Amino acid sequence: MKKIFLLLFTSFVAISTLMAQPKTGTVIPNFTLKNTNDKSVSLASFTGKVVLIDFWASWCGPCRASNKELKRLYAKFNQQGFEIFSISVDQSRTDWLEAIKEDNTKWTHVIDNGGLLANTWNVAYIPNTFLLNKERKLIAVNLSGKALENKIKSLL
């Protein structure tokens, strides 16, 4: 009985560790997902830029509302080296593409088919954002408004 409990506990700890959101201060490992043109885009392609990873979906009202603020920040800081890497958890490619068009967002969009990355990062709700510095180190999670703007400004 003791061995079974120990095995179950060890398995739970291992799975919990694998399924944890990245911790502030860690370098985010590279990953690759398909963009709107079905081309592979990797996080590594943004090395040297401040990146906001944005998990969202077309059906998520708060996600769509936050696009207005993200558009403002993108327009303000993109030429200085700021990039947004939006990762959709949509099941419908058509809905995803329509939402991008409707919201007129010009940054890089990819889709997490099957939610593998979102599950690996334990993204339990959306929108969910991760701000990375130029070396892909995680600086902050779920900042918004003036706090996000000030942090981006300090990293550029």
Image (spheres, rainbow, N blue to C red):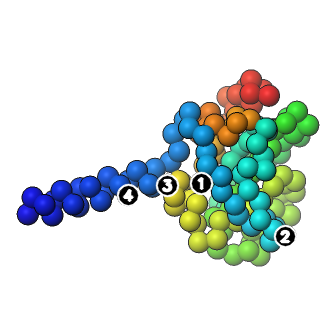
* Mark 1 vs mark 2: in front: 2
Label 1 and label 4: CA atoms lie apart by 22 Å
Classify mark 1: helix, strand or loop.
Answer: loop
Contact, mark 3 vs mark 1 (Cβ under 8 Å): no
Q: Position of residue 24 (x, y in %)?
A: 55, 35
- 128 relative to 37, above or below: above
Classify mark 2: helix, strand or loop.
Answer: loop
Q: Is residue 117 left or right of residue 69?
A: left
Evaluate whether residue 69 shows in this view. Answer: no
Q: Which residue is mark 1?
A: 126
- 83 relative to 5, above or below: above
Kind of residue at badge 3: Asn
Q: Residues within 10 Å of mark 2 (few under 14, many from 20)?
A: few
Which numbered dot is residue 156?
A: none
* Mark 3 vs mark 4: in front: 4
Q: Which residue is mark 3?
A: 122
- 32 relative to 68, above or below: below
Q: Nearer the viewer, residue 81 or 26?
A: 26
Label 2 and label 4: CA atoms lie apart by 34 Å
Kind of residue at badge 2: Asn
Q: Position of residue 72 (x, y in %)?
A: 84, 40
- 7 relative to 27, above or below: below
Contact, mark 2 vs mark 3 (Cβ under 8 Å): no
- Tally the numbered discs: 4
Q: Residues within 10 Å of mark 1 (few under 14, many from 20)?
A: some
Kind of residue at badge 4: Ile
Label 1 vs 2, first from the N-terminus: 2
Q: Position of residue 12 (x, y in %)?
A: 30, 57
Label 3 and label 4: CA atoms lie apart by 11 Å
Which numbered dot is residue 15?
A: 4
Q: Residue at x 57, y 59 (%)?
A: 118
